[in-house]
């Protein structure tokens, strides 16, 4: 099923006719569109090298599009630098772990409040919210993050990201390199953020089965272009055919 992004819904994030690449004259993405509905998990699938991670980097401001538009809450953010996109309610969790292994759990989480680091009361309040959200991190707050399991390290990354109370969280390959049991923990955390806190999540993933279990809407990219899209319950047959799952 494909809607071609024609019908406008309750979209908090909109990507339209996006052309972007790492060189001005070589676009990895060519005319891509993507719409993320508020309080839903929008999942982007496709083979390696089709531009999934490139799309997230462009949305967050690491790459400047050569054409097209990106809107957050109806307003273009093309000219908004990355650090200001954070204050507008956008967050990004990269594929590779971005924790500081020698620093404590609490120190890592507090780094997420850098933009309001002089507001000690807000830092304390947001840290406490994260300990309520992830009780195991309270128990390990003084422990070096490098001593935690891979799933708990991802939990620290999520907690750090949530310090700014983002509306939209961009997540790139959240379970890369994790054991099977730990992967389930990470997907459950993402599901809880949607179901319990109403967070909007844009998820890029290679773990097709797991991603489909938590997705609300799915986009498939192929060679830098939109191939197909639809609500997960309507597109799953096409996904089975495309990916042999």
Image: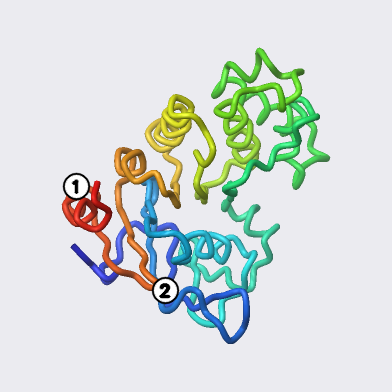
Against 60, residue 98 (above or below) is above
Q: Is residue 225 left or right of residue 156?
A: left
User: Which residue extends farthest right?
Assistant: 118
Looking at the image, tell me whether mark 1 or mark 2 is earlier in sequence order. 2
Residue under the point 40% across and 34% down: 191
Residue under the point 30% across and 38% down: 213
Q: Is residue 92 left or right of residue 34?
A: right
- Looking at the rendered image, the quarter that the N terminus falls into is bottom left
Looking at the rendered structure, the secondary structure element under dot 2 is strand
The image's mark for residue 29 is: none
Tell me residue 176's x, y (percent): 52, 41
The residue singled out by tag 1 in the image is 233
Quadrant assignment, res 125: top right
Residue under the point 68% across and 65% down: 81
Tell me residue 195's x, y (percent): 37, 34
Residue under the point 42% across and 39% down: 198
Q: Nearer the viewer, residue 127 or 145?
A: 145
Tell me residue 172's x, y (percent): 52, 50
Looking at the rendered structure, the secondary structure element under dot 1 is helix
Against 45, residue 51 (above or below) is below
Q: CA distance from mark 1 to mark 2?
A: 24 Å
User: Which residue extends farthest front?
Assistant: 244
Q: Is residue 227 left or right of residue 171?
A: left
Quadrant assignment, res 190: top left
Tell me residue 204's x, y (percent): 45, 52
The residue singled out by tag 2 in the image is 16
């Amino acid at each position: 099923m494909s809607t071609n992004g024609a019908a406008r819904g309750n979209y908090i994030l909109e990507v339209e006719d996006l052309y972007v690449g790492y060189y001005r004259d070589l676009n990895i993405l060519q005319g891509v569109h993507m719409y993320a509905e508020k309080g839903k998990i929008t999942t982007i699938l496709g083979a390696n090298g089709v531009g999934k991670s490139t799309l997230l980097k462009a949305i967050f401001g690491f790459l400047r599009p050569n054409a097209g538009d990106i809107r957050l809450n109806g307003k273009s953010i093309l000219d908004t630098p990355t650090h200001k996109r954070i204050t507008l309610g956008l967050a990004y969790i990269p594929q590779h772990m971005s924790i500081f292994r020698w620093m404590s759990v609490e120190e890592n989480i507090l780094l997420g409040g850098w933009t309001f680091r002089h507001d000690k009361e807000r830092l304390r309040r947001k840290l406490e919210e994260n300990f309520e959200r992830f009780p195991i991190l309270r128990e390990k707050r003084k422990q070096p993050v490098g001593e935690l399991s891979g799933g708990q390290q991802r939990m620290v990354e999520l907690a750090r990201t949530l310090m700014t109370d983002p509306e939209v969280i961009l997540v790139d390959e959240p379970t890369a390199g994790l054991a099977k049991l730990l992967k389930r923990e990470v997907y459950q955390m993402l599901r809880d953020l949607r179901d319990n806190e109403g967070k909007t999540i844009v998820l890029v993933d290679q773990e097709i089965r797991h991603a489909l279990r938590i997705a609300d809407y799915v986009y498939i990219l192929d060679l830098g272009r939109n191939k197909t899209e639809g609500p997960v319950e309507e597109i799953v047959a096409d996904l089975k055919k495309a990916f042999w799952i």
